Image (cartoon, coloured by chain):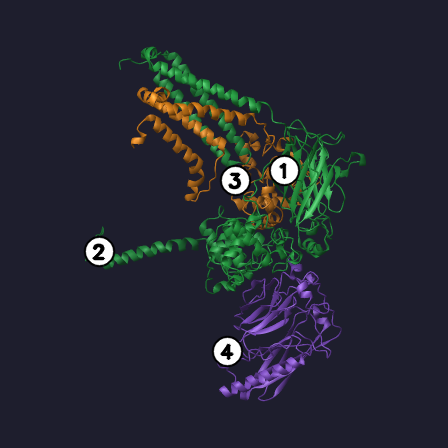
Chain colours: A orange, B green, C purple
Amino acid sequence: MGLLRTPFRQAIAILAVAYALIEFGIPYIPPLFGVASAKIPNTVVLQYLLTVTVGILIWVSDNERRWTEFKKPIHEVLVRPDRKLARGVLLVGVPLLMAFVAYGRALPDMSAPPSFRAIHPAPPSSIPFQGEIIELTGLENPLRSVGSLDEHYEEGKRVYYQNCIACHGDALRGLGHYAPGFNPTPLNFQDVGTIAQLTESFVFWRIAQGGPGLPNEGAPWNSAMPAWENFLTADEIWSVIIFLYEQTGHEPRRWEELEAAEGTEAEGS
Amino acid sequence: MRIALPWPCDARVAAACLAVALSAVALVPTSVAAQVDGEALYVKWCAGCHGEDGTGNGVAANTMLPRPRDFTLALYQVRTTATGELPTDADILKVIDEGMPGTAMPGWVDVLSQEERLALVDHLKTYSRFFQGDAPEPLEFSSATRGTDEAIVSGQEVYQSVECWRCHGQQGRGDGESAPTLEDDAGFPILAADLTENWTFNGGGTVEEIYRVLRTGLDGTPMPTFSDIVDAGVITDEQLWGLAHYVRSLSPEETPEVREVVSAKRITDGTVPETVGDEAWEAVEPIYVPLVGQIVVKPRWFNPRVGGVWVQALHDGQELALLVSWTDPSLSPDPTWADFAQRVIEIMGPGDEGAATAAGAPDQLVVQFPTALSDGMERPYFLQGDPRRPTNTWTWRSDAPDAVESIARGLGTAVPQPDGEQHVTAVVQHAEGEWKVLFRRSLDTGGAEDLVLPVGQAVPMAFQAWDGDNGESGNQGAVSTWYFLFLEQPTPVSVYVAPPIVLVLTLLFGLLAIRQAQWEATGAGARVARLPAFRLTKAVERAFGMGVGLAWLGMAAAAYRSASLGWDAGHSDLGFWWTVIAALMAIAGLSAMIGTFIHTLPRDEGR
Amino acid sequence: MIDRLWKARGVAVITALLLAVGCGGEGGGSDASGGGDSGPAASPVDAATAGHASGMVTFSGMAPANAEIDMSTEDVCAAKHSMTPTQETVVVGDGGGLANVFVYVKEGLESLDFPTPTQAVVLDQDGCEYTPHVLGVQTGQDYTLKNSDGILHNINASPTENRGFNVSQPVVMETNRSFPTAEIMVPLICNVHGWMNAYIGVVDHPYFSVTGPDGSASLQGLPPGDYVVEAWHELYGTLTQNITIVTGETAELSFEFNADMSAAHVPLGDPIDPMHPESHRTVDHQ
């Protein structure tokens, strides 16, 4: 442990371990225990490392002696005659690095323009559906009160497999074989942030009117979601909604819950 | 004899105890597997395509080509066993885990547990009595040879001598003369694999996987085994490895990443190339744009032939040259493919009204732009626009002499612009199963409804492609969503000015820091350094500490906002990590405030 | 015992020769006595008490014309044909005999175990055609897939009772295979040459025969008893006939196919006939 005796080296070591954990630990360790994980985006890595760095600085400066010791190697590089080589390397290397960063910044930005869109925009209170007006506010899935759930599930399964799997996939994760061809990618119904947060009437609206029925903030020009009212009956849509919830094990939000929760704009999230 | 055990026990009893314990351990996995109901899993996740009876006739089957596997025949493409042999359990599990590239079969490794997937393997085997016999023996595969240039050249010779080109074509694009007649064992038309797209190989695209397919064949398809000719000494095993390396070399080294922007370099010495074979194109990186079936408006098409197009662009400040290349085995309509196209039309669902009934259509390519750029993010609908926001489409057809520029307000509504307003030219080439179409147009045509292509700004661009000999026409083809075309500017001066300035400034700062430190360490500096440290008053310290804490809290709030944006965008992973950041920042902020509060409390200075 | 065996074999060989002459060597005749060459293991049949069955398979009505094959892209094969080659779907001889019919004992031999012949029969790919077009083998008996053309053929077999296979033969070469289970019939195709197809009948006894254009079929050396004999044709399906074998006598076989039977179900792993795609079972998928 002699290597880690000085606070400066300890700080470097903590930073290195933190980087390794964030960059490689997060994507690769949970799978060892059967938990799915993925690489985290570079911007997030940067944020984490900044946070760790600030933490380290707070720690080394917390105590006067440690702070002095921490600064010692830095100070030595700046002053001691026998550290001339290191000094020289830093004096050349750091400016070159900064110049390189500046060059990268100055290059013209050839990336696509940013595209922001609300995934779950506020729904209208009523929608036209195949020539009729359907009141969405307070609307529950009518099939839940008639017939057998199993039959609705089976019918929904047929509708889903004949129409939806190409994009939303067999596992309902939005990873159908057409998914790579779309931007934005198809919705992942297994995700707790999608249908589990929505009422069935909202889902009905999204299915019935699809991409073209989105308000402008939803970027209707990009979505490849068809307007299913051109393909399916209302009952088929309601049964595919039952299928989505049954197959994923999610529960739809109910209007009573929303009313009980008071802040009724919850629909927008 | 006694052995050390925590309880009194002689060796025989100990052995018995150990045996019982071991068998209990051994039993655990089986009992776990037995708890998983493979049939129920199959019905829930597989039957939609493969059918509850395992015949591959699920409700989704007629939107897929190749059709879902019929398990009752026990014919499996991906095996480590000889042709005609059953797959091993590991073979079946591999396909369940990883899916079948190039088909609708997804991988389940992230969806179902190991026990569940093993239970599915067991269940699939119940569909055929063949599995009641002895377990199949996998073939012994030699280890891979090195993919040297010589290996690839020898593989190319084998490709010629064993006549792979009869189906796969001379350049491997599935355009061999036998290709139009191919059928799988169930009688469905099947394409010879396009060997230039290894990410779509049913058996996998690595050299090892290609070698395995050469050894085992893809049972149930026209792809035979080549093990027999190695056994008969017609070619050596090493040559077969060479063939695998050669086939692998026909595809890009990496599976193309989807990138949003096609960048057009500016030619400064001359004008844009006017032929598809111009050597200027060799220096332009092709960008892969994936295409998928048009399944948004009627009549839908679930069997697109064109899985993607390669796009290259150049401009000279006056004119744009856009080169689009893609695999297409035939110049449609080709009479030798007429039966194939007709069969595809007959068997593909879902039979929307307006669906094509007769083959004989040409190949087509459409490149689409908005007619005008909006200030915001607003764009026309990605399928050739909408009534409010039209698109300018450049259409090329294999049965017409030149490209046609049209205004479209939705898929299939294109109206050609008047003759005087046609500004796009197309030069085309069909060779060795590949189309190359070169569009050229002035950046500014002066036409009222033509988009002025701006330099230095990303312009929305989308593609649609049809293969007539795959039964495609009308709305039934392959489409992309919006991509971007970026016409590069001459490099701005700042690119060359900023770095030296930054370099000099940093250098000066570094020198200054060193001088300062050295001055402090010697003579006068040392004396100054020994002076009592400048001390802030408690009040200032407290204000400063609280300020830092508040800043942290502010950043936490910003992070939380990023988190909720992530959640909303359906990126729950992003949302999660930003939430963690927000929590950490909030903790840091609160700690700073609490710490400041405690440290600045008035107290005895006795210590 | 050995003597009798040799006698039986002699009868078989002579019959085969006669048939071959009768067929004018037109690839038909096949191995009339099937696995008459019974090798080292002993046949359970006492040749001294055996009887025979023989007769005709005929076709009545207008035979449909066989589709012509365009071999213009395949010089090696085209050169081997003096006339435009055609499919061998319905081959009717001058005397009204229907060729390529597989005639075999379907029922009546269940209690007997026959030795596996050691001699392989040959299925040749010559001039981009399978010769013979219909072949009979015993279970476990080797058959040799032979490529006489020296260009790429693949042999893609799709049985239902046995395991299928798909092997490539890019040069002049031979590959031996066998089927362990009786199956009527195993279709074989070449995917490289979509017109090439053949059928293999696999039975667990030596009593089968493939007709030539003269339509004659002969089952030699059957033990006395009652049998069901079936005649199979790739387009017209099957006909059956009950016969009784008496020692030393020859029972008469007579099958008559006609053009109206073409809609009949073909009891096969659904033959894949590239020239008649509409006959595929794919039509009633979904």
> Is residue A134 at least partly visible in the picture?
no
> Which comes before the other along the chain, label 3 or label 1?
3
Task: Name the image quarter holding residue B414.
Answer: top right
**Amino acid type, label 1:** Ser
Q: Which residue is mark 1?
A: A223
Q: Comparing marks 1 and 4, which lies closer to the viewer? A: 4
Task: Name the image quarter holding residue B67.
Answer: bottom right
Q: Which residue is mark 3?
A: A191
Badge 4: residue crowd in 10 Å (few <14, some 14–19, many ≥20): many
In the structure shown, which secondary structural element does the residue marked by tag 3 occupy?
loop
**Amino acid type, label 4:** Pro
**Amino acid type, label 2:** Cys
> Are the residues flagged by discs 3 and 2 in contact, CB closer than 8 Å?
no
Which of C232 and B79 lies nearest the eye of the viewer?
A: B79
In the structure shown, which secondary structural element does the residue marked by tag 1 occupy?
loop
Q: Which chain does the residue under circle 2 lie in?
A: B
In the structure shown, which secondary structural element does the residue marked by tag 2 occupy?
loop
Q: Position of residue B298 (x, y in %)?
A: 70, 45
Q: Comparing marks 3 and 1, which lies closer to the viewer? A: 1
Q: Comparing marks 4 and 2, which lies closer to the viewer? A: 4
Q: Which residue is mark 2?
A: B9
Q: Position of residue C228 (x, y in %)?
A: 60, 79
> Are the residues flagged by discs 3 and 1 in contact, CB closer than 8 Å?
no
**Residue found at the very far right of the displayed protein:** B419
Q: Which chain does the residue under circle 3 lie in?
A: A
Q: Which residue is mark 4?
A: C115
Q: CA distance from mark 4 to mark 2?
A: 61 Å
